Image (cartoon, rainbow, N blue to C red):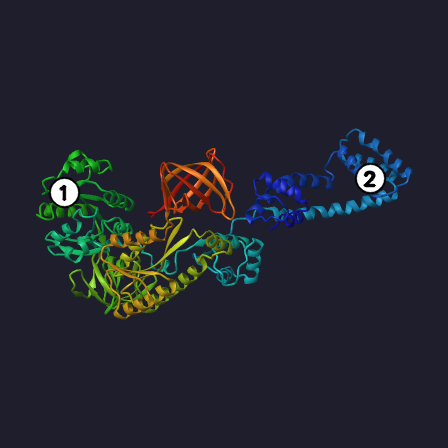
Amino acid sequence: MKVKELAKKLNITYKKLLAKASELKIGVKSPEDSLTPQEVRKVKSSLEGKKSAGKEKDKVSVKKKVSRKKAVSKVVKKREVGVKKEKVPPKGRRKGVKRATPEKKSPLAPSISPIVETMKPVAEKIPEKATLVTEKLKEEEKVVPKLKEEIKKEIEVPPPPTKVIKIDETITVSELANRMGVKVNELIKKLMAQGILATINQRLDMDTASLAAGEFGFGVEIVPLYGEEFLEEEKEDVSLLQPRPPIVTIMGHVDHGKTSLLDAIRESKIIAKESGGITQHIGAYHVSLDKGDIVFLDTPGHEAFTAMRARGAQVTDIIILVVAADEGVKPQTVEAIDHARAAGVPILVAVNKVDLPNANVEKVKQELSQYNLVSEDWGGKVIFVEVSAKEKIGLDHLLEMILLEAEMLELRANPNKKARGTVIEARLDKQRGPVATVLVQSGTLAVGDAFVSGFSAGKVRAMINDRGKKVKSISPSKPGEVLGFSSLPQAGDKFYALDSDRAAREISEIRQRIRREEVLYRRKRVTLEDLHEQIASGKLKELKIIVKADVQGSVEALCDSLQKLSTQEITLNIVHRGVGGINESDVMLGAASNAIIIGFNVRPEPSAEELAEKEGVDIHTYRIIYEAVEETKEAMEGLLEPEFKEIPLGRAEIKRTFNIPKAGTIAGCLVTKGKISRQSKVRLLRDNVIIYEGKMSSLKRFKDDVREVESGFECGVGLENFNDIKENDILEAFTLEKIARKL
């Protein structure tokens, strides 16, 4: 609502309203400025306090419960008003009015009846026209209380809403109107009054929806994304809970022996499958022991996979922090500690590579004590186990400590219900389609179960355990590869098994629709001003990239690492990201958008390679993430404008000047330092002030053109399009060398 509209509604001037708004620290300065509903209520509440006193006074005066002095003065005031409204009142009548003023000084009466008697002679002495005006004022006085009642109703702060509606984060105007039971047109009018132009199908943010609902007297309760309220975990019956294996995540710095340690425990060769001996994505493995079962999650150690480590920490019960005895605490070790503490998960420290001659376990304990990980030997509570994955030293002790910690945590779950879990990793398989590694956290997942995970739904067609064998069901705390997804889920999505395919499809379809609308609603529009500035300055450059990888986690990690390379001058725009091999559609997109295609652990199809060669699209494939990041960084550096470094060549003093027709002024110089070259740039100094900077039009020695003149020799120099040369000026010769910039 605008200031002038509110002032008119409250029957006050807009200047008074602006003054009141200034007192309340509301930022409006002109009558055309708009006020929010909260600010309107704030102003009205403030004005109500001032008017309430006046209102009570008017009520008393109407009921004649005022003193004699006030009653008489009021009559006189009315008479004076009546006289003022007459443009040319007779003199006699004006005197008659004045003679009524002595009544004002009469002493106060003890009751109301003498007041009325005193008022009668005064009324008799008031002239006719003044009496008519007074009567009109009396009639208006009867209307005033009604108006004040109406104003009070408007000013009063509305009571807290009794009705509450539930809305999600993506509600539209029509949906909000339907839930409140009001017409869409009325809701749009309210939004327009708040300065929001909205269409019937437009999405509203939470603040706007709350304000609009408040205008109709409704409260708002925000609910999570569609379907989440139906999928929430119910309170478990304690009698149905059964012990489950602990989920243990192995974390630590790159090349500290995490996968080698797990390999030694499982007595398999996982590390041989990884490129460069470095874990590229999360591996989930189940290990059966004599004293119990343990599920291990192996997370990547290098810095590019921060999101994966965070995901591993969220689904785990115990974290084993692997630290190499010969290297000690490293950056990713500290990061792993932070993730574990953020998730509230207990930490066991495995000091690996104790068999090396330069191993120093005490140094590791000292460094970790700085991060409040104090060994039990030093009086702390953290279990330290010395192990060697290569020599298989201390592995039994480590497993005993894990089972002991799990026993203290009392890990339990109900296997006799629909499964709940988390997607650890996802990838696109040529033969089998979307495949996801799912860690079941409660319930039992069986073949044929309908499920929903994020924006994807499906039915379990087959399940494969970590050993590559098909299984019919997966119990709590066990991982498995699930086939049957309608689309590729995101790593970290919650996995819910449902009773029917229909329910899963409905939830998935509505979530997908909401996501599409959200993307369209939040898409950044480029303004003409921004576009003009970018084109005019020529400073903003862009490198477009298409990223394809074997698994979803690698796509996320690679994209995160590449986006960190963007600077103010050059931006990296990831046009498309996906899981699977490089196909013809990727090449066509790269040709249309002038983008480079980066493949991680994938290869292009033969037809895609031919098309790329024809269209001139660059395809680069990598097996190690650091190589992809480094080469992309070099490509971005090639787009940067080079820096120029000035290299001085020589200095000459002008002894005489010669004016030559058609050639202009020629400077007779003596080279005092270095040399003067014909190809070099020159700078003319006069009293150490730069007069000219540019190129030479000629360089001669005697009558011959020369390429350069050495120190101690004389020469004639002509400057390009410049003739203001004087004796004793100095000429400096220099060149500019291009230097490639680095990010």
Percent coordinates x, y for residue 725 in the rendering: 49, 39
> 73 above or below 167?
above
Residue 554, quarter of the rendered image = bottom left
Nearer to us in this view, 558 or 350: 558
Q: Is residue 309 left or right of residue 223?
A: left
Crowding at dot 1, Cα within 10 Å, few <14 / some 14-19 / many 20+, comes out as: many
Q: Of helix, strand and loop, which one carries label 1?
A: strand
**10 Å crowding of disc 2: few (<14), some (14-19), many (20+):** many
Marker disc for residue 353: none
Please say if 103 is above or below 356.
Answer: above
Q: Nearer the viewer, residue 664 or 232?
A: 664
Q: Tell me the residue that label 2 is attached to.
A: 79
Marked residue nearer the N-terminal end (2 or 1) = 2
**In the image, what residue type sits under mark 2?**
Arg
Residues at marks 2 and 1, CA–CA distance in whole angstroms:
102 Å
Q: Nearer the viewer, mark 2 or mark 1?
A: 1
From the image, tell me which residue sits under label 1: 385
At a point 31% along the width and 67% down the height, the residue shown is 612
Describe residue 172's horizontal placement relative to residue 391 as left or right.
right
